């Protein structure tokens, strides 16, 4: 199954994994328009957006079919159906990095016409963004040229960086959830059990002593855990 997962914490620590069909990608001619590539590679998939609070009590999940001809358009459809707020998204990425811009129309204020006019102008600006410019240009000059005539203010940014949240405890939990029988079978076949984190490729190895310790206090009856 092909899968793209991206996670971001409230401190802008991100991690992501993409599983894709390399052969299918390689077979697409270079000149193929991006929209066509998207439809070809994605097919009839779904996009799931999950928002979680630390204490797990305020978990929200929205699922919509992948629509349009890009991930950005699929996200627009998600915002339209889940938050019912008109939203425009532009995304750009290359081998060095990724950038994006999201504009959302907030619920009507006291002057609905003024809000409507401002939104039309914001959409006009978003329609004219060349995604590549988001990667290369400065934020200030992009905003100034796209939203001319508006009082645009730039707030201080926050650094975004990669950080994986895997650790030996979580991996041990995954093995416990698999059950002692299956894990011991793997141990018999291979001499040790290695679990590789899909996000950072860090390998976690367990030898027979580790495995015995793992199941010693659970008798193999641990409840399955959610893997994030
Ligand atoms: Zn990891």
Image (tube, rainbow, N blue to C red):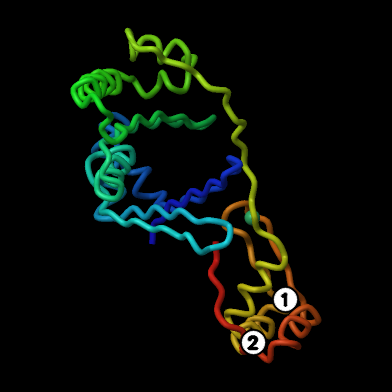
Residue closest to the far right: 209
* Mark found first going from the N terminus, 1 or 2: 2
Q: Residue at position x 28%, y 36% from top?
A: 107
Q: Is residue 107 left or right of residue 162?
A: left
Q: Position of residue 57 (x, y in %)?
A: 50, 64
* Relative to 88, residue 40 above or below: below
Residue closest to the far left: 113
Secondary structure at badge 1 equals loop
Label 2 CB-ligand 1 distance < 8 A: no
Crowd class of label 2 (few under 14; some 14 to 19; many from 20; radius 10 Å): many
Secondary structure at badge 2 equals helix
Residue closest to the far bottom: 219
Label 1 CB-ligand 1 distance < 8 A: no
* Relative to 98, residue 48 above or below: below
Q: Residue at position x 73%, y 79% from top?
A: 191
* Relative to 224, residue 22 above or below: above
Q: Position of residue 120 (x, y in %)?
A: 21, 22
Q: Quadrant of the N terminus?
A: bottom left
**Quadrant in which residue 143 is drawn:** top left
Judge depth for marks 1 and 2 and give the one in front: 2
Of 87 and 204, which appears nearest the observer? 87
Residue that carries the numbered disc 2 in the rendered image: 180
Q: Position of residue 177 (x, y in %)?
A: 58, 79
Q: Residue at position x 29%, y 32% from top?
A: 105
Of 138 and 16, which appears nearest the observer? 138
**Quadrant in which residue 77 is drawn:** top left
**Label disc, if present, on residue 182 of the rendered structure:** none
Residue that carries the numbered disc 1 in the rendered image: 192
Of 195 and 10, which appears nearest the observer? 10
Crowd class of label 1 (few under 14; some 14 to 19; many from 20; radius 10 Å): some
State the CA–CA distance, disc 1 to disc 2. 14 Å
């Amino acid at each position: 199954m092909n899968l793209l997962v991206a996670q971001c914490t409230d401190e802008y620590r991100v991690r992501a994994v993409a599983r894709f069909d390399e052969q299918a990608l390689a077979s697409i001619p270079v000149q193929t328009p991006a929209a066509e590539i998207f439809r070809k590679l994605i097919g009839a998939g779904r996009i799931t957006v999950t928002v979680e609070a630390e204490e797990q009590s305020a978990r929200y999940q929205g699922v919509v079919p992948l629509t349009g001809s890009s991930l950005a358009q699929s996200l627009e459809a998600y915002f339209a159906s889940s938050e019912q707020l008109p939203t425009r998204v532009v995304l750009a990425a290359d081998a060095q990095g990724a950038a994006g811009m999201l504009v959302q129309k907030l619920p009507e204020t006291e002057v609905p016409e003024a809000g409507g006019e401002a939104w039309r102008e914001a959409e006009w600006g978003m329609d004219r963004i060349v995604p590549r410019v988001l990667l290369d240009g400065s934020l200030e000059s992009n905003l100034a040229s796209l939203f001319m005539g508006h009082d645009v203010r730039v707030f201080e940014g926050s650094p975004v960086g990669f950080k994986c949240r895997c650790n030996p405890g979580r991996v041990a939990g995954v093995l416990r959830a698999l059950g002692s029988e299956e894990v011991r079978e793997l141990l018999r076949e291979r001499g040790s059990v290695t679990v590789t984190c899909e996000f950072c490729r860090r390998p976690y190895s367990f030898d027979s002593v580790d495995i015995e310790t793992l199941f010693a206090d659970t008798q193999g009856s641990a409840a399955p855990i959610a893997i994030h």
